[in-house]
Image (cartoon, coloured by chain):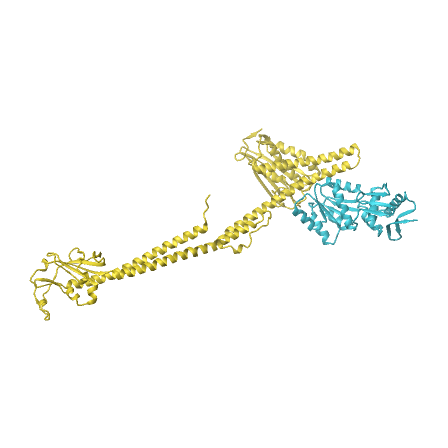
Amino acid sequence: MKRYSIRRRLTFGTSLLLSVIFLIGSVVIYQGVRGSLYSQLDEQLHTSLSLMILEVEIVGDRVENEWLEDLGKDALRIEREYVQTWDVVTGFTKRSPALDGEDLPKIFGDLEEEITRDVILEGSGKKLRAVGITIYPKINNDNDNDNDDDDNKDATISAFDHPHIVVMAFETKAIERTLSHLFRTLLVGLIAAISVCVFGGYYFVRSSLRPLKKLEQDLAQVDINDPHALINAPDEFPEELTGLVEKYRDLLDRIGRVRVRERDFSANAAHELRTPLAGIQATLEQTLALDRSGEDYRRRVGTSLKIAIGMRSLVDRLLHFSRLQNGTETAEMVEVNLNETVDERLCSLERKISGRELKVEKLFGRDDLVVVSDQSLLRILVGNLVDNAVSHAEEKSTIRIELIGDDVGGKLIIINTLFGMDVPDMDRIFEPFYTEDEAHFADSEHSGLGLALSREIATFLKLGFQVSADAKKGFFVEVDFTFKESGIKKPIVM
Amino acid sequence: MRILVVEDYSLLREAVCESLEQVGYAVDATGTGDEGLWFALNHTYDVIILDLMLPKVNGVQILMELRKLGKGVPVIVMSARDSVDDRIAGLDAGADDYLVKPFALKELLARIRAQMRKLYEKKAALVEVGDLSIDLAKKRLHRSEAEISLTSREFGLLEYLAFRSGEVVTRQDIWDHVYNYYDDANSNAVDVYIGYLRKKLRAGNPLASYIQTRRGVGYLLEYQSK
């Protein structure tokens, strides 16, 4: 799978974005300056044209253009102004000296409408900005001018018979030069800006991403076997990575807790198996150490067998637990009478119950609660809960066992007192091998696996399972056999 | 030699105690941590064998309490916890040795002997007194090639004297190290067993004396020939 690089993407993306912004800015500046310069030129052109058309007048029987005639007297203007007039009727035309015999294009619109256009002189190739207009020559009736005889002549022809096209143009060379200079300046600026963006962006992105490398190194150094492993120096990480670091720390914390639980599970499982195994080994070694009577041999082999049976029971529970956790447990659905299951377990615990002077209060419904479920798992579940109550209830106290059912489901509730006893740690009570005392009461057949296994069975059989403890109310367990939600197919009322 | 066994699994505890008593050790045993601590603080032991996962007070707590109170008694931890971290924790808490369950009783006995040799600064397992050889490892007593048969209590007494050979050992010391908590506190029990032992030791060499009496003080394991 092709992986993208955040550094390249950020560097390239930022550079591209800034380049486009700079390019647009440069174009706007260039066009703005160009527009401004041409606007100035056009204004000059229009002003000059406005003045010039006043100079096109009929003197006697001729149309004269004093502007053109005066042009020769001004050295500056003679090179700068490109002017040409046409008599629309006769086709007679006059040019300014700057045109050097070339013709300007006839630019005209409606009468007295000014038309502006860029033109290129074909011969010289000069680029000009031109404005053209169609006008009627002015009728000269001014006789006050004593200095010029011709000017005193009255018009003898009609101005309307001689409409003129007047085109005036200025060279744009200076503007083009300015614009060319501006273009080069902007281009160099643009390249410089893009370069700065690329290299600067690369530097900042790289330095910004450096903490990721640090995080990677820190994570690589984390010892997964250390339940208290942490990512070092979280303060050095930027704000944006704080959340990520915190998540990693949470993750490591959770992994650490799982590791501790796994370690404890292994250690406790080892303890629960190694200790009786040591008992068997020591007993058999002692048995063989001396010559003994047959009775003594039988007694010692019996002791070893008792330990082995206890170990088999523990191994069975561990296997169930493992299969339930791994999802490899299978259920064989048969009819199970819960009342009988509870009674069977109580019967097997009779000696213990009387030994601890416990009173068992049974609140069973009128009909037996019969469900279709896995018999062996339900026996383990019910057996563990009843056994727990009998073992952990205060001596001479009462254990209450309720078993009630109706059309929609049933409930098994077991309550035993905790008077004078510590309330168990409810956060840890379902941890395998958890007991209030780490010794697990090696002689008491309680390994601390019962509740953990019971919950796994309840989850597997989709039964509700609630446990609570209170110093006054006691230890309360409720198993909810809701038919609709559980794996139980149907309630069978016997 | 007197040993305390603190182990909550009764079947293992019984087998270990029986094994120790067979080889002549005086043994006190208990299944709970609080009782174990009481025994350790109120009696004198040559070695304590201690399980770590105990009801009420765990093994590490017992170890730390003993060391805090300056009790230097050798402690061999026997535990089902076999990880390196567990062993380190046990040894760091003050244990002198760490034995992982299950174990062979022979190994436990060998480790106890090693701890005793260290305690009494005896590098060799063989102690010679005149023409007698006391094998502390095999728990055997020989004169030349011939083995002298002793009861476990008698050998326990001789072993203690051998460990402290060259020193005068008081009756109280003998009582503390050779008899367990449940033995009758008979005032002349020590003298009676010393008498039995003298008789057996001199059986093959009537002119020799191996256990000398220091009147008003105690006994000394030392060879003297008349």
- Image position of A168 with respect to B42: above or below: below
Task: Say which of A261 and A89 sits in front.
Answer: A89
Residue occupying image coordinates x 67% and y 49%:
B89
Would residue A413 be seen by someone viewing this image from the given angle? Answer: no
Residue occupying image coordinates x 26% and y 62%:
A174
Chain B: give its colour: cyan
Can you give x and y, in whole percent of width and height, for residue B140 in the image?
82, 42
Outermost residue, left side: A156
Task: Say which of A250 and A359 sits in front.
Answer: A250
Q: How many marks?
A: 0
- Image position of A328 with respect to B130: above or below: above
Residue occupying image coordinates x 41% and y 56%:
A197
- Image position of A480 with respect to A179: above or below: above
Would residue B27 be seen by someone viewing this image from the given angle? Answer: yes
Chain A: give its colour: yellow
Can you give x and y, in whole percent of width and height, for residue A109 in the image?
17, 55
Can you give x and y, in whole percent of width and height, for residue A186 in the image?
34, 59
B65 sits to left or right of A292? left
B88 sits to left or right of B218? left
Can you give x and y, in whole percent of width and height, for residue A335 in the image?
58, 29
